[in-house]
Amino acid sequence: MLKTLSYLQKNMVWAIPISMLFGLIYGYLFNATPLKQFIIPVTFIMVYPMMVTLSVKTVFKGRDYKLQLITQVINFIFVPLLVFFIGKIFLTGADPKFALWAVGLFLIGVLPTSGMTISWTGFAKGNKEAAIKMVVFGLVIGSLAAPIFTKIFMGATIEVDMLHMFKQIAIFVFFPLFMGLITQFFGMKKYGKKIWNEKIKPQFPPFSALGVIMIAFLAMSLKAKHIVANPGDIIIILIPLVIFYLISYILLTITGRLLFKREDAIAMVFGVVMRDLSIALAIAMTAFGKEGMTIALLISLAYIIQIQTAAWYVKFIDVMFGKPKIKAEEVVEIEKVSVPEFEKVTSMVVDVKKILFATDLSQTARHAVKYACSIGNKYNAQVHAIHVVPDVLDEYSSGTGINLSSSMDKKKWDEFNKKNIETAKGLIHERMKLTSQKVLEEIPHCPLSENRTIVLAGNPVDQIVKTAQDNNFDLIIMGTHGHGKFEEMMIGSTASGVILKSKVPVLVARPS
């Protein structure tokens, strides 16, 4: 199930339209009224997983006050005014539905900013730490301001019960936020920070994506008969949405270029344009009664525009802000520590001629290298070192809600990965020189050599297994982290993956 949900999360750009289409068909053919009872549980499914992954502690780090202040001023002064006037211009008419669509557009404008801000910012090589702060600040301020702003700006258009809105926000924002923080606390306490961040936390966002898809289905099915009778409504709704996002991107790009460096400018852009549509949907579906279905229709369609425009904007990010500066420490971190004294190992029955030493240049990898050298020396075997640089395209796809590989220029990202690999090669060669010197002090004629270094980009498990099998290696040697009982049982995510997939024997050296 989780695999299916992850697939849907990565392909939200078509999953939402398909869900809306099925909702339209269902609502037209059947009585969709009984589906209203699912609005509250589905909304919780949509919001709670987002809160579990929210890193509130990051708010207290750094000194990017100017960036945060300007971003929130834009979020809570410029954007609400912009959506209000766009609604006044494009969503006017005698039919009450126009006023409700204007409310939906206003809710989008007054509720920044979604968790996707962090993923898109990271993917574009922006300031992720600043983006996390924007999400937290926007969530708290927006949740408190939304009822007040809606009353002030839209009170003449539709009856706004501020107290009821505050109650709904408490139920669908602050309660899930509280539960999310509690889940984080006990999760990290039970499994440890590393296991929580790498294995458990990534399992929550796909459920949020499921909630969004289900809400889109509900919103469309409950309004299906009206939409079929009035198909032009979709065009009327899409026009102001496209104009809103277009104006936002243009003005934010200009502001970013004038006031901030590349990384901060990118964070500001996505900290504004990636609106929290999930919270907006939750409020629309629960705080406005039967009229909420009409409001939710516009918000559901906003998902399509928001994801598509973000994908296209990233394609041209280097044109607008210049290319990112790749620092050596962003690729690998190398510590200048001595190689410990080598331990003797018992003889092996098999004949070992080629050893693949998999290293992530961590402390445990430096511990494992002594086994590679000792065994290589004992059997007169060649020792090759392999280091895998994670493919950033795959890494950020999982959190954006869209399969980015289908939206980005493959040649461009191949070149980016090539730069990462070349930088890593240089750094690893330097490390090999240092290691070789230390090894020779203990083991004469050690087969470890800087000339036998393999650096690849992609999934570490897949690349290590493939390299070992394609090049006829006799043994894989690697290190693993070990801090808690659960982690010891799992051996380590990369090591356990290699053990499960590799046909070549694997030796895992634990730290002493």
Image (cartoon, rainbow, N blue to C red):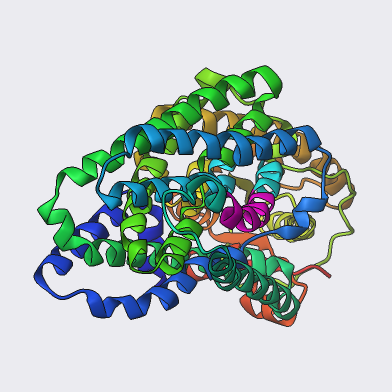
Q: Main secondary structure of the magenta part?
A: helix
Magenta-highlighted residues: 135-149
Q: How many numbered tags mark residues here?
A: 0
Percent of width and height locating residue 242: 36, 34
The foreground one among 94 and 354 is 94
Above-or-below relation of 148 to 453: below
At horizontal 62% and vertical 35% (from top left) the residue drawn is: 74
x 14%, y 63%: residue: 25
Residue 161 on image: x %, y % = 52, 64
Does 231 lie within the magenta span? no
Q: Measured from the top left, where is residue 306 in percent x and y?
A: 41, 42
The residue drawn where x is 14% and y is 47% is 231
Quarter of the picture holding the C terminus: bottom right
- Residue at x 33% of width, y 39% of height: 91
Q: Is residue 408 visible?
A: no
Of the pair 130 and 31, the residue shown nearer to us: 31
**Placement of 99 over or under 273, stated as above or below:** below
Any part of residue 9 in sight: yes
Picture quadrant where residue 140 is located: bottom right
Residue 286 appears at what percent x and percent y?
Answer: 44, 69
Specify whether 245 is left or right of 221. Answer: right
Closer to us: 39 or 343: 39
Q: Name the quarter where the N terminus is drawn.
A: bottom left
337 and 315: which one is in front?
315
Residue 263 found in image quarter: top right
Q: Is residue 277 left or right of residue 31?
A: right
